[in-house]
Amino acid sequence: MKKRVAIFISGGGSNMVSLVRDMQSGDHPAEPVLVLANDAAAGGLKKATELGVPTAVVDHRPFKGDRVAFEDALQAELDKVQPDIICLAGFMRVLTEHFVAPWEGRMLNIHPSLLPKYKGLHTHARALEAGDAEHGVTVHLVTPALDDGPILGQARVPVKDGDTPDELAARVLTQEHVLYPAVLRRFAAGDLTPVYL
Ligand code: GAR
């Protein structure tokens, strides 16, 4: 039985596309069953539809900061498709323990830094400001603490002289598209050995 995967997005969904394409590429232990966005304008929704993956939207704004009610609405969408695994892929809402605890060990996140460095936002600018020679991306299991949890994979990229945050972000994103599918493939097969690229 293939593992059923729900992917949460907020924007363009390029990581979602790389995950779906890999799952659809043949012999894979998982299949995509839902792409869920917190914004109806998320560009990834159209891409998911084109890839034949069902979509749902739970807009966080009407909940006016009631995170528990928002999370209950997310869970209600999941209940309809019964996923085994959630992949957060550029999902830009913080999830509380209320949602995370029942999914602990079954929810992955991709974060554009070499964790534990640069949790939170603006990771590329922060790596440049720090003068780091190396930057990268991490896939980890989600725990209630933000951008924490056991690391399932990391990919490194060099920082080049004169890099702007956007140039560095683009170099990292290319590696995100390699790392996340590699981690999901391994994770869905029950292997938690980290992938290092
Ligand atoms: C990616 O770079 C991802 O690592 C980052 O958002 C981008 C989404 O791009 N995630 C975070 O910053 C999470 N804190 P995408 O929508 O094209 O996949």
Image (tube, grey):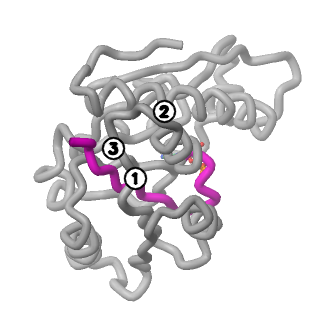
Q: The residue under label 2 is which amino acid type?
A: Pro
Label 2 neighbour load within 10 Å: few <14, some 14-19, many 20+: many
Label 3 neighbour load within 10 Å: few <14, some 14-19, many 20+: few
Whole-angstrom CA distance, mark 2 to mark 3, is: 22 Å
Judged from the image, the secondary structure of the residue bearing numbered disc 3 is: loop
Describe residue 182's horizontal placement relative to residue 142 as left or right: right
Q: Which residues are magenta?
A: 1-15
Q: Is residue 49 above or below residue 148?
A: below
Describe residue 184's horizontal placement relative to residue 68 as left or right: right
Image mark for residue 181: 2
Q: Quadrant of residue 47?
A: bottom right
Q: Quadrant of residue 106?
A: top left
**Quadrant of image for the C terminus:** top right
The outermost residue toward the right is: 162
For the point 50% across and 23% down, which residue is it? Answer: 114
* Residue that numbered label 1 is attached to: 32
The residue closer to the viewer here, 120 or 189, is: 189
* Residue that numbered label 3 is attached to: 146
The residue closer to the viewer here, 100 or 177, is: 177
Whole-angstrom CA distance, mark 3 to mark 1, is: 25 Å
Front disc: 2 or 3: 2
Label 1 neighbour load within 10 Å: few <14, some 14-19, many 20+: many
Q: Is residue 58 above or below residue 180?
A: below
Whether residues under marks 2 and 3 lie with C-beta atoms below 8 angstroms apart, the answer is no
The outermost residue toward the front is: 26
Judged from the image, the secondary structure of the residue bearing numbered disc 1 is: strand
Q: Is residue 5 magenta?
A: yes
